[in-house]
């Protein structure tokens, strides 16, 4: 008869935070799932609603009826403390705007030709050396013959055999060129701006997973060496004093968690017990932790194979000013005129 090994949970190995849709489904975009081992603690406390107590006394003062309704679980209160003022993880957990900057150091690539058909602009390059799918590029020197905008920042969705790439555009007409160039961009996170006064920092919430080591008989177990903890739906915000001093700046988030049946098998398909994700938390022993591959940063996940693909370059916002989190969509430059991001001058 198989039996458990009575392992203890010791130390935190890694966490993964994944953005949720308004319905609670796990989102799968480039800015939707973040993994790191740089956290100090992850704590949670079951919170119960005390059952009502009913007591009635007889005329002689003795108790004739006494009943207490059961206490019921409402949610778990949660706290997450991270090691550094990580702008990407902070944006996922606490809303606001992720600030980025083009820190490109590469040169330009020449355009051979460009054309528009059905709202798609196809750019033929002299060479794609140094380019990859997901790279950000700044395009200059393209002029549509009728209307719309072509020049600007684009993200390469595919590279084809004839060294071309395509992007959507509102422009129409024949494309003409004037010293056209495609410049590689390296859009990198450099900071974070808090939510506006009155904003809901938690947005649609996140799913949080945490891994800890399983230890038995004084050493880490060789079978199922990790505890995999899941919190299928959590709403957090920044908490505590933010003190810049001769010491570590506190980076703490607190909030609550409840169940979310749409968590399913998780972003990578490794959670084996989807039927219990309607509970505020659960854990199970397993063989995998993101710490085994030293994962840190944004990843997209394949729910069939479990593989994670690192996001090496932030998606380019429609307006060159940053990213709204929790939506992950382009930040509207008309919403706040006092924010300047993605400066092409690294000194600004």
Image: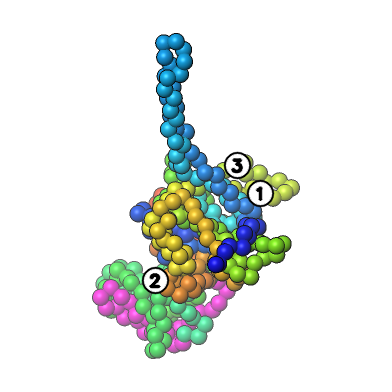
Do the numbered discs 1 and 3 sit on residues whose CB atoms are within 8 Å? no
Task: Judge whether 272 appears above or below 235 on screen.
Answer: below
Looking at the rendered image, the quarter that the C terminus falls into is bottom right
Which is in the foreground here, disc 1 or disc 3?
3
Q: Nearer the viewer, residue 15 or 321?
A: 15
Q: Label 1 belongs to which residue?
A: 249
Q: Is residue 31 visible?
A: no
* Disc with the residue nearer the chain's start (1 vs 2): 2
Q: Label 2 belongs to which residue?
A: 151
Query: Marks 1/3: CA distance?
Result: 11 Å
Q: Label 3 belongs to which residue?
A: 240
Q: Nearer the viewer, residue 274 or 4?
A: 4
Q: Secondary structure at mark 2?
A: loop
Q: Quadrant of residue 139?
A: bottom left
What x and y, as percent, mark residue 26? 41, 60
* Disc with the residue nearer the chain's start (2 vs 3): 2
Q: Which mark is residue 4?
A: none
* Disc with the residue nearer the chain's start (1 vs 3): 3
What x and y, as percent, mark residue 52? 43, 29
Q: Residue at x 52, y 60 (%)?
A: 284
Which residues lie in the magenta part? 103-127
Query: Marks 1/2: CA distance?
Result: 41 Å
Q: Residue at x 49, y 74 (%)?
A: 307
Query: Marks 2/3: CA distance?
Result: 45 Å
């Amino acid at each position: 008869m198989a039996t458990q090994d009575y392992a203890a949970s010791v130390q935190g190995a890694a966490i993964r935070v994944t953005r949720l849709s308004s319905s609670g489904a796990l989102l799968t975009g480039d800015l939707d799932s973040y993994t790191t081992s740089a956290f100090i603690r992850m704590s949670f406390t079951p919170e119960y609603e005390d059952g009502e107590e009913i007591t009635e006394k007889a005329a002689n003062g003795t108790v004739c009826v006494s009943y207490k309704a059961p206490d019921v679980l409402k949610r778990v209160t949660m706290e997450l403390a991270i090691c550094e003022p990580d702008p990407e993880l902070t944006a996922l957990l606490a809303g606001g705007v992720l600030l980025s900057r083009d820190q490109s150091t590469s040169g330009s690539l020449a355009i051979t030709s460009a054309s528009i058909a059905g709202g798609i602009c196809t750019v033929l390059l002299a060479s794609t050396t140094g380019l990859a799918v997901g790279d950000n590029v700044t395009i200059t020197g393209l002029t549509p013959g009728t209307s719309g905008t072509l020049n600007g920042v684009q993200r390469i969705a595919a590279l084809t055999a004839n060294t071309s790439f395509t992007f959507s555009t509102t422009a129409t007409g024949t494309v003409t060129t004037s010293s056209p160039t495609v410049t590689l961009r390296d859009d990198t996170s450099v900071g974070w701006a808090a939510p506006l006064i009155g904003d809901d920092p938690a947005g649609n919430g996140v799913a949080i997973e945490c891994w800890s080591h399983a230890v038995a008989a004084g050493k880490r177990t060789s079978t199922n060496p990790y505890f995999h903890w899941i919190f299928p739906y959590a709403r957090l915000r920044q908490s505590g004093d933010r003190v810049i001093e001769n010491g570590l700046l506190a980076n703490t988030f607190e909030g609550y968690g409840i169940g979310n049946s749409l968590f399913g098998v998780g972003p990578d398909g490794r959670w084996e017990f989807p039927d219990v994700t309607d509970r505020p938390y659960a854990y199970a022993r397993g063989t995998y932790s993101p710490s085994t591959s030293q994962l840190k940063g944004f990843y997209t996940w394949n729910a069939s194979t479990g593989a994670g693909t690192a996001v090496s370059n932030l998606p380019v916002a429609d307006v060159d000013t940053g990213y709204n989190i929790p939506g992950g969509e382009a930040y509207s430059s008309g919403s706040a005129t006092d924010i300047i991001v993605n400066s092409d001058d690294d000194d600004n």
